Amino acid sequence: MSAADVVLDGFDRVQQAVGRVLEGLSTDQLAHRVGGSANSIAWLVWHLTRVQDDHVADLAGTGQVWTADGWADRFGLPLPPEDTGYGHDDEQVAAVVASSELLLGYHRAVYARTREYLRGVEPEAMSEVVDESWDPPVTRVVRLVSVIEDDLQHAGQAAFVRGLLPES
């Protein structure tokens, strides 16, 4: 099993977790914010998908699915197209409202692009340094594992919020 295969397994797990957390939820449930200020499921799934899209596109040297495939227009969020949610304040979190179908569609599109990228990456490229601003410098495989870790944390947060949703 190659490093790309292991990384792909991680992204498979993210995709499965996202599907489970979104299943059967209304737009209102997805927008619910525990205590009135916690991150909503919609924001968490949108953000984890935006980060994956941003980082994989950067590694692949391609455009992001968000802009290149029209997802930014479909969502119609009042945010700049390059926004990934990093550092969002309360108002920006509240602005991320979307249906489960839209969130899942975007996530599946990013997942498909991620799979395509990983199936084509050469084994020796996985150990290539992609970011020298860290000590130690970050390799391609370490960057991808970091994205998986961040995605799974946010998917877990979304699952937790789902468990706290008020009964309909």
Image (cartoon, rainbow, N blue to C red):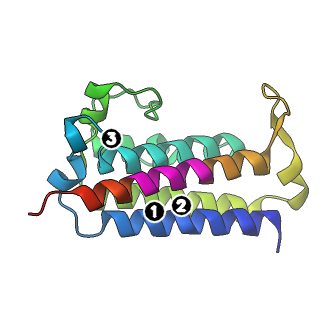
Residue that badge 3 annotates: 39
Distance from Cα at disc 2 to Cα at disc 1: 5 Å
The circle on residue 116 is: none
Residue 11 drawn above or below residue 53: below
Q: Quadrant of the N terminus?
A: bottom right
Q: Amino acid at mark 2?
A: Tyr
Residue that badge 2 annotates: 111
Marks 2 and 1 in Cβ contact (< 8 Å)? yes
User: Which mark sits nearer the N-terminus, 3 or 2?
Assistant: 3
User: Which mark sits nearer the N-terminus, 3 or 1?
Assistant: 3
Q: Position of residue 131 (x, y in %)?
A: 78, 32
Q: Secondary structure at mark 3?
A: loop
Distance from Cα at disc 3 to Cα at disc 2: 22 Å
Q: Position of residue 127 (x, y in %)?
A: 88, 49
Residue that badge 1 annotates: 108
Q: Secondary structure at mark 2?
A: helix
Residue 53 drawn above or below residue 118: above
Q: Residue at x 54, y 46 (%)?
A: 53
Q: Main secondary structure of the magenta part?
A: helix
Using residue 133 as the reference point, say whether residue 103 is left or right of it: left
Q: Position of residue 50 (x, y in %)?
A: 48, 43
Q: Is residue 9 magenta?
A: no
Nearer to us: label 3 or label 1: 3
Most extreme residue toward the bottom, as rendered?
1
